[in-house]
Amino acid sequence: MEIRRILALVALLAGVAACTPAGAPPVTSAAATGRGTFTLPREVEKLVGPADQDAALQAYVDRVGQRVVAAAGATGFRFIVLDSPVANAHAVQSYIFVTRGLLALLENEAELAAAIGHELGHLVQRHAAQRARVRQGVLDAAVEAAATSGSVTVGRAVAQDGLLALRRYSREQEFEADRLAIGYIVKAGYRGDAMASLIDRLRRQSALEAQIMGEAPDIGDRPSAASTHPVPVERTSAIATLPLANAPGESNEKGYFAAIDGMSVDDPPSEGFIRGRSFLHPTLRLTFTAPSGFRLFNDSDGVLAVNRDRSLMLFSCLPTPVSGPLDDWMRNKLKPTPTDIQTLEINGSEAAIGARPRGSDTGLGQARYVVIRDGNRVCNFALVSEGADQDRQIEAMVRAARTFRTLTPAEAAALQPYRLRIVSPAGSTPAQLAARMPYPDLRMERLLVLNAAQVPADLGSRSEIKIVQP
């Protein structure tokens, strides 16, 4: 199932659910437990999410960042680890952020410096401000063209041409940030080829994620005129022509491994954990299990379960209490008003189930609402299936919603994040090492990507490797 198709259906699904007001924190929001002791300004945290609370890890990343900044001749920047398992790095104001997910993926300190250097390059060159000015110029030109010609079509054509030029401009900025980063890290004493290896780490992770989603692994390698980022092969080809691309320098793999050993590679406990087809939230003490064949994804908008036949489940909780019977709330608040509303109990909790009227939104197939009162909260499932087997899938998803229950205090206390461990591969075969990975599928593929290994035999040739353990 294509990622673009999933995103389109999620947008429709959000409309079907009609249960979480715009801007309201969903069940998986960190707002469930409040801010930690290591905090960001609220306006920044709203953009990027909360900071990780590991002070030693924060200090290590900041030391590397300050080393790169000093080499660049810049000042006034802070380097923050974000509490997210998604591999990413970005910059806001004077902050440069890397996620726990990116740290888990990298192999050494030089690659971390390259990621930081790339983001620093964007900030030093004020790329975001430049893009904003160009974007405004495109919009102004489109409005003027429409007014002068008296044709909205002409204005739209000017806008389309301008936006394509803006995408090309953004791609050039990515190349420039790569070039600047290599200069920064080499001057800081790191290996010049760390930028190319960083790009390869991200490319392989993207291919693995596509494989997990059932897509072709090379989907991220396909050039697109609509993309604002060059594909990895374009970036590495451009880097290869630079004089410093292979400059010698430090990697510090040992120090890097020591810094990330024991780091969580999971969602924060305040956002809940995915364990196979089950979602378990230790803070809110709730759980449910998706049907066979579905994959779960925990996101800031809720928990999404996806099946390759275009069936989707979206789970979230309302930010405010609901008074009165849930069937009345469903009739009065959901539009179009559901049909076939039934009240029931789900594992001892009040619940209501309704169907979206057929024909109310062509292209959505079948849709159901399942609303459950959980103590002072009301949680909901929005279910959509548009495939040939939609009737059976809708029923399977309704049964999955009925697995919703409250965790006991002991069950909640036992839930802990998966952690990255640095171990010796000696005495174990690659298959045995992969079997230790706590995932339901693609264990070897995940292990190879985690360790930047091409084939299983590469693992045995190393003194230390990374592995994920419960």
Image (cartoon, rainbow, N blue to C red):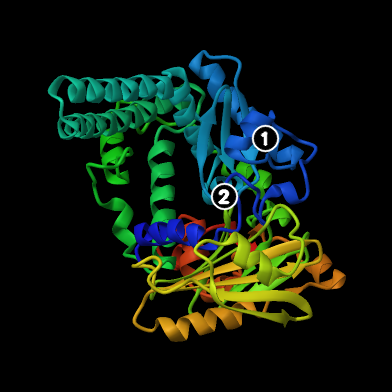
Circle 1 — which element? helix
Q: Residues within 10 Å of mark 1 (few under 14, many from 20)?
A: some
Q: Look at the picture and state if 91 lies above or below 413.
A: above
x and y percent of residue 397 in the render? 54, 78
- 415 displayed left or right of 227: right
- Residue on which disc 2 sits: 101
Q: Look at the picture and state if 87 lies above or below 131.
A: below
Looking at the rendered image, the quarter that the N terminus falls into is bottom left
Residue 105 visible: yes
Q: Look at the picture and state if 3 lies above or below 257.
A: below
Q: Look at the picture and state if 406 lies above or below 177.
A: below
- Residue 458 is tagged as none
Residue type marked 2: Gly
Determine the residue positioned at 70% across, 33% down: 59
For the image, the number of numbered tags is 2
Circle 2 — which element? helix
- 222 displayed left or right of 422: left
Q: Earlier in the sequence, mark 1 or mark 2?
A: 1
Determine the residue positioned at 35% across, 61% down: 5
Residue type marked 1: Tyr
- 356 displayed left or right of 438: left
- Residue 60 is tagged as 1
x and y percent of residue 70 in the render? 56, 17
Looking at the rendered image, the quarter that the C terminus falls into is bottom right
